[in-house]
Image (cartoon, rainbow, N blue to C red):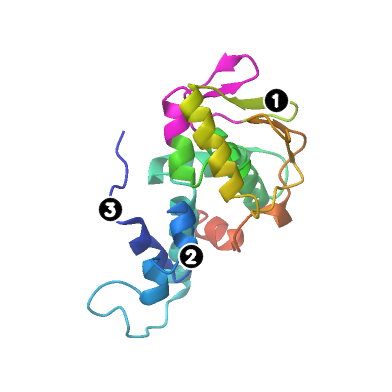
Amino acid sequence: MARYLGPACRICRRQGMKLFLKGTKCMTEKCPFNKRGYAPGVHGQSRSKLSDYGLQLREKQKVKRMYGLLERQFRQTFERATRAKGITGEKLLELLERRLDNVVFRLGFALSRAQARQMVRHGHVHVGDAKVTIPSFPVKSGQAVRMVGSEGFLKSVKEYRELTRERPLPAWLDRHPEEPLGTVVGVPKRGEVQFPIQEQLIVELYSK
């Protein structure tokens, strides 16, 4: 499957905010966004006012890249949100938050969503008693997520958890105090999304 393989920090600079795509590096002085907080490219430092369409497109690109989706995947997720009962924008964020790779990341078992996606692909994540290797797998309320692997891998997961201990755990997730185990105990709420997102702009973009 195609995947963006370019510099992750370039995406943050383009969006004008830290998306924490590189894990702990984003919280150090080595983060390129701290050194060059302007957009990349020759004209990155010049200010230009975006049109309404430009604002909508920028917001969609931000959310898509934050969760590590390609355009087709993101569009399919949006279409599922439109068919669900409730407010489309909030349903979109709920579906994105319930992705297995995002759940692993939010539980603190990985430093970034990209790392969490790799763990899922390599078979290190079990949902219930079954191994799941699909990052987009929608985890439901009541399901448990456990990290499995060699002693060295589980030691690394423990270290990641320690490094992310200051990251707030959303109310819809519960984490075992010692074991690499977490449980989805509810439905993601709009106010529990990690970054500021204007989902209505995305709805307006796809509604044209």
Q: Is the Cβ of the residue at disc 1 closer than 8 Å to that at disc 2? A: no
Circle 3: is it few (<14), some (14-19), or many (20+) Cα within 10 Å? Answer: few
Q: What's under tag 2, amino acid-wise?
A: Lys
Quarter-of-image position of residue 194:
bottom right
Residue at the spot x=42%, y=82% of the render?
A: 49
**SS at mark 3?**
loop
Image position of 88 with respect to 29: above or below: above
Q: What's under tag 3, amino acid-wise?
A: Gly
Residue that numbered label 3 is attached to: 6
Residue at the spot x=42%, y=73% of the render?
A: 34
Circle 2: is it few (<14), some (14-19), or many (20+) Cα within 10 Å? Answer: many
Pinpoint residue 200: horizontal percent, then vertical percent: 60, 61
Residue that numbered label 2 is attached to: 18
Pinpoint residue 163: horizontal percent, then vertical percent: 57, 50
* Magenta segment: 118-138
Residue that numbered label 1 is attached to: 143
Q: CA gap, disc 3 to disc 2?
A: 16 Å
Q: Nearer the viewer, residue 27 or 194?
A: 27
Q: Pick whichever of labels 1 and 2 is earlier in the sequence.
A: 2
